Image (cartoon, grey):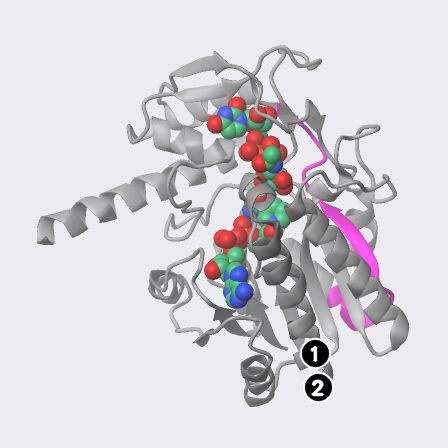
Amino acid sequence: MNILLTGGAGYIGSHTAVALSEAGHEVVLLDNFYNSNPSVLDRLQKILGKALPCIEADIRDTDVVEKVLREYKIDAVIHFAGLKAVGESVEKPIEYYANNVQGTISLLEAMKAMNVKTLVFSSSATVYGDPQYLPIDENHPTGATSAYGRSKLHIEEILRDVANSDAEWKIICLRYFNPVGAHESGLIGEDPNGLPNNLMPYIAQVASGKLPHLNIYGNDYPTPDGTGVRDYIHVVDLAEGHLAALSHLERNTEFDIFNLGMGKGYSVLEVVSAFEDACQVTIKYNITKRRIGDIASCYGRVDKAERLLGWKALKTINEMCITAWQHQVRTKSELVNVKKFI
Ligand code: NAD
Ligand code: UD1
């Protein structure tokens, strides 16, 4: 298949590009590099041994997206492009709705015009809000607590309406839990700008000496050790989930939603300890107050994806930590090399 990845230069998109390309699909990336860097294209070329076409464009530019769909004879789209920082979304809701919701509408307009009606959308477990029960299945009530989360919910609803309007549309929403880790080469991974918001990249930067210590946001939650529990999933497993979703859409036409996670929770202290064991480093940490908006525990029920998509996350927390670390080390050494030439 010829597959367009919007936001394909980003963290999850680049890993999915590798999985799809290795499975024999023709992959085209479209990204405005708002939260990524064109250097990822060289890294993808090193991994795959060939260059992937990448168009620098905004998904809101419907004409350009139409042109790309036409010129590359695209059969299906995986839609990663979007803004994703929860805190920032509370301060800048208009930008979040414009980019995420309006961006998706623009993409759908282009797809409809070009008669490309197969779509996999990056949603998030954040749409479940504060869990009413655990593990969270796909029927759990939704109730996002930020503009980011609500943008995902709005998009899911729009996609459901679109799928209902015309039987030719085949759409799957994937609700990711907490993607972490990196490709085994260390060449691609999560590269947050500035101070990382999320746990794993923060730990990796403490391990490398870039940051002095980790702040653990609260140890008084109703969890076994008092720290927050999350469902971490290796990004390479997650990438494979997209392949499974596309294969499913070749056989099924129904709009559907799937959780993608490990189906198992780890506390912050368990992740710290796993990272120390896997990478033979010491992670200094302080316990600080709870982060506003955080929840105690969140992990998914993932048997629906296993049953219907034939997909299951297999990589362990150990592999998540090792690859996150390898990517951190690789990124740091490249920065050192760059400095030498200045
Ligand atoms: P990312 O920021 O690394 O990748 C998103 C990419 O989209 C970036 O390369 C960015 O430059 C691009 N982009 C943003 N707006 C665009 C626009 N208007 N036009 C073209 N390109 C645009 O993020 P990621 O972690 O790879 O996440 C991918 C998707 O998965 C996002 O939609 C995100 O909301 C969703 N998601 C991510 C997580 C996570 O923890 N990483 C969890 C759940 C859901
Ligand atoms: C965050 C997002 C969520 C998104 C998810 C995807 C918020 C409020 N939520 O959630 O919408 O779907 O990422 O990856 O941003 N922690 C620390 N110290 C740190 C960082 C995190 O103790 O420096 C703790 C948190 O309190 C939490 C756990 O580590 O208990 C995981 O945090 P994080 O990686 O930010 O993920 P989420 O909170 O699940």
Image quadrant of ligand 2 equals top right
Q: Name the residue nearer the viewer: 175 or 60.
A: 60
Amino acid at dot 1: Glu
SS for tag 1? helix
Residue 144 rendering spot, x and y as whole percentages: 74, 41
State whether residue 292 is above or below residue 119.
above
State whether residue 166 is above or below residue 261.
below
Query: Tags 2 and 1 in contact by the CB under 8 Å rule?
Result: yes
Is residue 259 inside the magenta stretch? Answer: yes
Residue 195 rendering spot, x and y as whole percentages: 39, 36
Is residue 108 inside the magenta stretch? Answer: no
Q: Which mark is residue 50?
A: none
Q: Is residue 155 visible?
A: yes
> Residue lying farthest bottom?
71
SS for tag 2? helix
Q: Which residues are magenta?
A: 247-266
Q: Which mark is residue 113?
A: 2
State whether residue 210 is above or below residue 97.
above
Residue at (37%, 59%) from the top-left corner? Answer: 37
**Circle 1 sits on which residue?**
109
